[in-house]
Every structure is written in structure tokens, then in C-alpha cells.
Image (cartoon, helix red, strand yellow):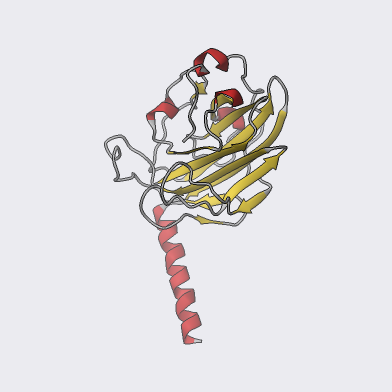
Amino acid sequence: MIKLSATLTAVLGLFVASAAMAAPITPVYGTFGPLAGATFSGTGIPNNPVAITTVGGLTLGLAASQRFVGPNLGHDGAGTYTAPAGVSQTAPSPADPYAMWNFNIYIGGATAGTSFRIFYDFDPTVGNDESTHGTIDIPGAALTSNPSQASWNLGMNFLAAAAAGITPPAGVFDPNASGQYTFALVAYNIGGPEIGRSAIAVKVPEPGTIALVGLALLGAAATRRRA
């Protein structure tokens, strides 16, 4: 997982990344494919495909995956995943509602002299601005493992609570809401500009839409068999 040193609270104020840009987050990566060795600090979490950006000696990886059970998420091959709406039935959910899917983070390489910002989204509106996202600021010097990895769920309480380095988005995350959520992992030179990012989108269709797509795929398969 992404582990931070005990000095994080003291140093975060010195390494706040540049202000958010006035634009929606759209998928950005160098490659969208396998990230060898990535576990996202879990067991069985797929590392293919991942939005991967390599800049200097850094590797930034961002992905989405099903939480604990179920098939891997579908994707369009270009940084957008498709996830089901609904509440996960694996503890601590449903008492503390989690989504059926997680977003996954990977930071590898030399992090000295670099700070990071993670953008995450509670608003399912398509195309909402980057400035409406929650942010987590992490100085590279505070990372205590290499690579640093994590798999988080938008239903996790810490993502909704203001704390040192964390500015949550407005509103409350609803795992039953359909729409689109966007995420970015951004690297900055300390006190300087952005030097690279990986970004993804997660589409959550209406349940009926997913069913129709499944029926269409079954129909296409039957047609191929008859042919």
C-alpha cells in the first residue's frame, strides 16, 4: 500500500502541488496495458490494463478493478473502464457503503525532489471540472516503499474527510449512481510545474443498459454459432 512516514503532517504544507487546472480530466497515459510487478498492495488485483506514464525515473500507474469478487472490469482500450453500479457486499460494506469497484495507484522509481497529487471524483456528471475533484497531496520524500501501491474505494471514509494533505470533493459518494468518475495521478517538481500524469475514467452505466449490452453480446455469439 501507499505508506507515508510519520513526518507527513509536518511536511505536507511545504510540498503542495500546483493548483488544479480548469479543465475536465480525460484519460492520459503513455501506454494502456500490463504493468509487470504491480499488485496494488492486494492479492489477485489485475495489473492489465493499467494507464502507465513514465517520466524521467518515475512510473505512474492508474487502473480500476472489481472489488474482491466478480469479473475484471470491461474497458475501451483507451483508458476508460466500465464498472457496475451497486453496493459491495464484502465488509466493511454494506454497513459502510463501498462501490463494487476500486481505483488502483502505483508510484515507482526515484521520488526524491518530486511531489504527487491524486485526483478523485464523487460526482458522476460527465465532464465535471478537475477543480471539483478531491485531492491527496503526497511529497515523494514521505513515501516509505518503492514501488508505493494502493487499491482504494470511493466509499472509504478517509476520502470524504478533510485532513492533512486531503481535500475531499463536495457531496457524498453514492455507489448506486450511474455516470462517469475520473481519476488522475500527477507528478510535480517540488515547488514547480507538473511533469507527468496518468488519468483514467470509470463509466457506471444504468443497470438496464448493462443488461441490454449483455443480451446483445449473447445474440451476436448465437449468430456466429449458427453461421
165 with respect to 59 (left or right) = left
149 with respect to 78 (left or right) = left
Residue at x-position 45% and y-position 79%: 222
42 with respect to 180 (left or right) = left
Residue 66, percent across and down? 42, 50
Residue 59, percent across and down? 64, 41
Residue at x-position 30% and y-position 39%: 93
Quarter of the image holding residue 61? top right
Quarter of the image holding residue 193? top right
The correct choice, above or below, for 33 with respect to 114 in the image is: below
Q: Is residue 140 visible?
A: yes
Residue at x-position 72% and y-position 22%: 192
Residue 108, percent across and down? 60, 38
Name the outermost residue toward the left: 95
Residue 151, percent across and down? 46, 40
Residue at x-position 64% and y-position 23%: 17
For the residue pair 57 and 75, the one nearer the viewer reads as 57
214 with respect to 48 (left or right) = left
The correct choice, above or below, for 11 with respect to 214 in the image is: above
For the residue pair 43 and 26, the one nearer the viewer reads as 43
